[in-house]
Amino acid sequence: MPIKEFTCEHGLTKKFMDFGYEIYKADSNWIPPLRGDLCRQLKEDFPFHLKPGNHQRKFLATAGGKVCGRVAAMVNGDLKNQDGEQVGTLGFFECVNDYHVAQDLIGTSLQWLNQEMGISHVWGPMNFDIWHGYRFMMKGFERDLFYGEPYNKPYYPEFFERFGFEIINRWDSLELEGRENLERMTRRGQKRYTYLKDKGYRFEAFNRWQYTAEIKKLYTLLTRTFNGFPGFTPISYEEFLRLNSGTRFAIDPELVAFVYNENGETAGFIAAFLELADAVRAINGRKGPVSALKFLNMRRRVDRINFFLGGATPEEISRGSGLGLGRASFYYIVNQTLKRGYEKVLLTLRLVGNPARSLPGPDAPAPQREYALYGLSR
């Protein structure tokens, strides 16, 4: 199988990008990424490529003059495994349903990582880092995607496993619906919330009139609370802003809160967002006045909330109130969600093994969606 190897050559980069849209064009559940954002990530002046210690190479598989697969091999200088060893990643993987194509793509990209970069530990799929998209969907293909959910062809995990990759981490997402169910699952958290409030804790809603300052506060808390999370690497505040430029449309200020303890110190945060999958899908990867009107029209129809982020500061965890704060925060957000008239909540991308997965309690249904990150060592 002919494999073309390149870095940022314009013509090949365009084919690389276009193949992602081509392979999903008949899939109505797919959420097309914004073309401008994706194009920026693949150019040589993208911040990842400019950072010392980072490297990348792209690979295209072709047959009869047509692209039939793609992958990018990347070295993020900050990405290490638990033993402190450098890890390479495979990302932007897309392929027709032919294992031989995938085998050639993966094999060639791994050869570059090993022989050119000296990398023997590889994770995938991961585009640069955990901030830009990673993990395969393993279960839940028949369900309506939420914005930011990993999505791929169902046969991709099998291709990676046939090559020798093994699952190194799992995540899931849980759909909850109905006021009675939601209230029942937050009763434990309600007691904890009352206890913390009586003790002097404050839950302060996101201030929309101080948007920039609040986003910077969220960035700082994310960086502190997720440090140590599998695959976590730091990014600049400027890149965080670019990544979350559309967050303003997903924020309902009543569904994002910063938590302060009895001493007035920042204890943590909690964030749920409007589910904008249909709105983003409607613009089909393009910006402009017409797309903006389509987006805003679909945004008005949102009836589902994504409980997406939450965390306690290291200091708060050391005080022994991490999980208790999580239960209280879960109650707070669900209660706010119900007050806003929403009765559908998604608990998204929960790391298997993380104690926070217990927040809905023992009566919660089984997760309907599952995801995995793979690893290979040679």
Image: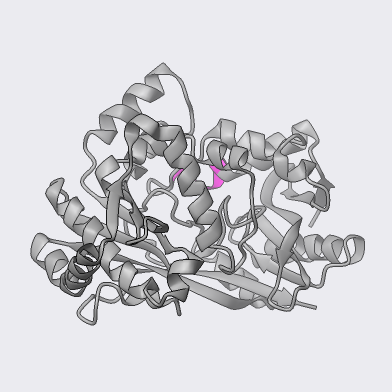
Residue 281: percent from left, percent from top: 39, 39
Asked if one can make out residue 195 in the rendered structure from this viewpoint, the answer is: yes
State the scheme by which the image is colored: one colour
Asked if residue 354 is among those painted magenta in the image, a careful observer would answer no
Please state the horizontal and vertical placement of residue 378, each as a whole percent of the image: 80, 78
Asked whether, in this view, residue 135 is left or right of residue 110, the answer is left
> Looking at the picture, how far across and down is residue 179, in whole percent?
10, 60
Q: Is residue 18 visible?
A: no
Q: Is residue 14 left or right of residue 136?
A: right
Residue found farthest to the front: 263
Bounds of the magenta segment: 21-26
Residue occupying image coordinates x 78% and y 45%: 51
The part of the image, by quadrant, that contains residue 367 is: bottom left
Q: Residue furthest top?
A: 289
Q: How many marks?
A: 0
Nearer-the-camera pick, 80 or 344: 80
Residue at 39% over, 72% down: 322
Residue at the image position 58 percent from the left and 61 percent from the top: 97
Quick one: which residue is furthest to the left in this view?
A: 180
Q: Nearer the viewer, residue 367 or 227?
A: 227
From this view, report whether residue 47 is shown above or below residue 137. above
Name the residue at 37% across, 53% down.
145
- Please state which of residues 9 and 293 is positioned toward the viewer in this rendering: 293
Look at the image and tell me in which quarter the N terminus lies: bottom right
For this orientation, the residue located farthest to the right is: 115
Q: Is residue 25 magenta?
A: yes
Look at the picture and state if 326 lies above or below 26: below
Give the image location of residue 279, x and y in percent: 34, 36
State whether residue 47 is above or below residue 77.
above
Closer to the camera in the image, 137 or 44: 44
